[in-house]
Amino acid sequence: MSNYIEITSTPGEIISIANGIRSKGMELTAQLKGIKSAIDEHEGRGDTFPSDQFTDPFVNDNYHMAVPAANDTTVPANQAVKESALYCGTKLTAIGDFVATAMVNYDATDQQGGADIGNAVT
């Protein structure tokens, strides 16, 4: 059984939108890599959370709490947030790629189908 779709704009317009999504995903990934690097550098200095009666419980019980990450692993919460943010940019890029490829394939199949119908009629 087939599922039919109705496209009310041109495949080229959809490909253009998909390329825009891909571009935004790449931009997001680049920005987030810079932010992640800055956070890692700051955390690496060791003075992010000075040890005291308030920060120690927070760091141990929350900041470094083991949580599921975007890639189905378990990591400390601070790492999961950074990895998940990068994952969003990566997935946005992949969605743009997928939609653009799907529309190219759709357009080629539609044109070929039209040509086949035209040939069968004549």
Image (tube, grey):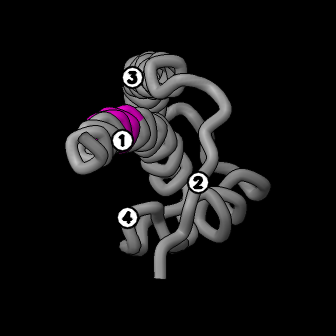
Label number found at residue 26:
3
Of circles 1 and 4, the one toward us is 1
Of circles 2 and 1, the one toward us is 1
Label number found at residue 100:
none
Does label 4 or label 3 sit earlier along the sequence? 3
Q: Is residue 114 visible?
A: yes
Amino acid of disc 1: Asp
Does label 2 or label 3 sit earlier along the sequence? 2
Task: Judge whether 84 appears above or below 37 on screen.
Answer: below
- The residue where tag 1 is placed is 110
Q: CA distance from mark 4 to mark 3?
A: 19 Å
Of circles 2 and 4, the one toward us is 2
Task: Judge whether 118 appears above or below 75 on screen.
Answer: above
Residue 80 position within the rendered picture, expressed as x and y whole percent measured from the top left: 49, 56
Does label 2 or label 4 sit earlier along the sequence? 2
**What range of the chain is rendered magenta?**
100-109
Residue 97 position within the rendered picture, expressed as x and y whole percent measured from the top left: 34, 35
Amino acid of disc 2: Ile
Q: The residue tagged with tag 3: helix, strand or loop?
A: helix
